[in-house]
Image (cartoon, rainbow, N blue to C red):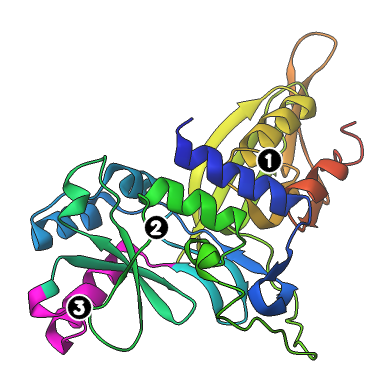
Amino acid sequence: MNQIAVVLDGLKQKISHGSTFIQRSYNSIGQATFHLPKPVKPETLQAFQAEFKQPLPSEYQTFLELHDGAKLFMLGDEGLVLYPLEEVIEKTIEAKEDGLIDEDYDHYWIIGEVNEGYLLIHTDHAKTEDTPYMYWKYHEGSTEDTDAIGQNFGTFLERSIIAQGDMYWEFNIFDVREDDYYVEEETEHEQAGVPIASEERVRIEIEYPIYRRGGFIVSFYTYENGKPDLWWRSDYDTMKQVHRSLLSTLDEPRFHFTEINVFQKEAPIWQNEDASGELIAKRVEHPQTQIMQYDGYQAFVNDLPRPLPGWE
């Protein structure tokens, strides 16, 4: 597992244990929300390189291949926002047209925002892996005036997570002899939102066998534009095998679902053998169905789908 994947997996483990209440500078506190979407599409990577005639820095591209953007440690509208790559292309082009990226300082891509400012990649510095290329600037003004973060994307992401979405590179700028640090007595508490989602929800269908000694068919669906999209389908001999497979899939670092729906359905007919070995087919008068809903992986672990009556 690469560095970016390890860092994100650590974040997901932290959140899955309920550690979503955060505190940032100036006593900005509340229940944070997180969103990690699907990986970037290969055609979007190709469109980026065609537009800017330069490959992405390897660490940043690795992140996009795991998640096409992110919203981390969000308290309302404030937090660490990393744009999807299509939005990076759009915002960078618009910024050049509007003068936000100054024509004499046009060596930047806008990849996100944090604390009333944009996150930038310095394109000249990004040509080599050993030159810090992450920068930041206020929303107002142009790229003539930017602040160097002094890191590449991987270290920036890890330290931003440690700092709970705060601007960690400014921590050492404060000087007690010159600056005032204060917190307001009344702090608004944000309502808790969806804990995390690299997928918003998942649908699992368990079809019971026609033969009493047959296998279970499991279909695993993720959602694309609100519609179920089949990801995989497999056969299993027992419910124990079904449980093991589902636990293994749902525990993968890239999949952290906030809603897991399990549909079990019995076949409308079943077949068996009589004493002579002849197959006997019978129609099931009222095929059983069962729907179970879980709020995330841990809830699924604590209450695994139970076999339908008569199939224990």
Farthest residue, direction front: 177
Looking at the picture, how far across and down is residue 66, in whole percent? 43, 47
Q: Is residue 167 above or below residue 75?
A: above
Real-space Cα separation, disc 3 to disc 2, in angstroms:
28 Å
Q: Residue at x 72, y 28 (%)?
A: 244
Q: Which residue is mark 1?
A: 207
Q: Residue at x 56, y 82 (%)?
A: 77
First in residue order: circle 1 vs circle 3:
3
Looking at the picture, how far across and down is residue 135, in whole percent? 32, 64
**Mark linked to residue 144:** 3
Q: Nearer the viewer, mark 3 or mark 2?
A: 3
Q: Is residue 61 above or below residue 92?
A: above
Secondary structure of the residue carrying tag 3 is: loop
Determine if residue 304 is in view: no
Question: Which region is colored magenta?
Answer: 82-104
Q: Amino acid at mark 1?
A: Glu
Looking at the picture, how far across and down is residue 191, in whole percent? 75, 80
Q: Is residue 94 magenta?
A: yes
Q: Amino acid at mark 3?
A: Glu
Q: Residue at x 69, y 42 (%)?
A: 206
**Mark linked to residue 68:** 2
First in residue order: circle 2 vs circle 1:
2
| Total numbered badges shown on the rendered structure | 3
Real-space Cα separation, disc 2 to disc 1, in angstroms:
34 Å
